[in-house]
Image (spheres, rainbow, N blue to C red):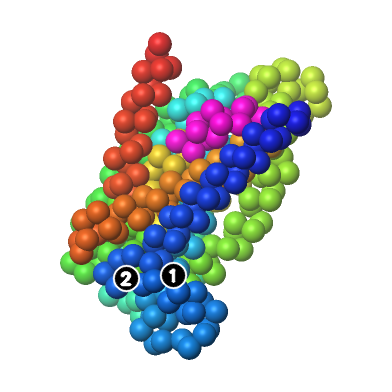
Amino acid sequence: MPRNSAIRYWLVMLASLGLILGAIYISLTNGQFDMSVTDVAKTLLRIHPSPDYDLVIFDFRLPRIVIAALVGFALGIAGAVIQGVTRNGLADPGILGINAGAGAAIVLFMFFFQGGFNALGWLSTLSMPLFGLIGGLGAAALIYFFSWRNGKLDSQRLILVGIAVGSGLGALTLFLSLRMNPHDFEMAAVWLTGSIWNANWAYIVSMLPWLIVLIPMIMRKAYIIDLLQLGEDGAKSLGVSTEKDKNTLLLGSIGIVSVCVSVSGNIGFIGLMAPHIARRLVGIHYQRVLPVSGMMGMALVIVSDCIARMVFAPAELAVGIVISIIGVPYFVYLLYKAKA
């Protein structure tokens, strides 16, 4: 990595970290129950702990911040991988139908355990990522089946098939949610808009093992994504097993997205925006794009969650709605730019 590029990369990472820490500070200290920095520090360091402060920080605000950080980081990386493998800057986990597949499986899980969902406790929480993964893989299998042409994956066809499969699974999800009892329907509706208001430590424990395995696996293959930008023939001439590596990277991304959807619902546009911002800041090499995409995704979700909690307080928006308000104009801008 050239010296100037390395300096730019680390400056971007430090600036992202500063933005994230600033958003975390605002999230911890502001809300219906305002707290000072001293109160937060004493609570975290267990200096004269107060039950009220413990409840607000450890049961409500801190799990929410951790979930937002993990989901944003993971979706940013997954989006960068999908755009790199398909060589399409408009590709996104939501557009490809992966979110819809994972969401349909989670709603199916909720549907069959109507009324007893909360009674299952930890078992239901730990099962949700597994159901999300099954749904994401099922959607991916359908997309792969219809996108496979002449012994290889057609990247452009992949996008079109993903949109079609996503629409079909979205209709199935809506049908199932309308047949739920009122309480479960309300929970499913809030969850489907992309919400982390019900975040807890059990959700964090359920998703961490998947992220710990899948994200490092993808990071190690960052150089493969760079080589894939040369095209099928160019990558093969450099010794890349293109179909095997593309499948590994896409399946890893599907796993990451499915796990995120299982705990945060359908948060769209992070996988679209974060990689574009990262490439503008640090260039096109994926060994830098992937970490910066993760940091951008983390910042977007944490900041959007701050806005969702505070702008309309005491009412609260789902974080997915805030991100969509930002993401839709950005997507239109990218379409206009691509057309130009």
User: What is the number of the mark on residue 89?
Assistant: none
One can see residue 253 in this view: no
Separation (CA) of disc 2 from disc 1: 10 Å
Q: Which amino acid does label 2 sit on?
A: Asp
Q: Which of 100 and 51 is in front in this view?
A: 51
- How packed mark 1 is, by other alpha carbons closer than 10 Å (few <14, some 14-19, many 20 or more), is few
- Report whether 331 appears left or right of 17: left
Residue that appears at 51% across and 43% down: 296
- Callout 2–callout 1 Cβ contact below 8 Å: no
Question: What segment carries the magenta color?
Answer: 273-285
Instruction: State the quadrant of the C terminus.
Output: top left
- Residue beneath label 1, please? 37
Residue that appears at 29% across and 59% down: 309
Most common secondary structure along the magenta stretch: helix
Residue 230 position within the rendered picture, expressed as x and y whole percent measured from the top left: 68, 19
327 versus 190 height, above or below: above
Residue 74 position within the rendered picture, expressed as x and y whole percent measured from the top left: 54, 50
Q: What element carries label 1?
A: helix
- Residue beneath label 2, please? 34
17 versus 191 height, above or below: above
Residue that appears at 37% across and 76% down: 56
Query: Where, by quadrant of the figure, is residue 178 drawn?
Result: bottom left
Query: Where, by quadrant of the figure, is residue 152 drawn?
Result: top right
Q: Nearer the viewer, residue 216 or 151?
A: 216
Residue 334 position within the rendered picture, expressed as x and y whole percent measured from the top left: 40, 24
Q: Is mark 2 on a helix, strand or loop?
A: loop
Q: Which of 287 and 258 is in front in this view?
A: 287
Q: Which amino acid does label 1 sit on?
A: Val
One can see residue 228 in this view: yes
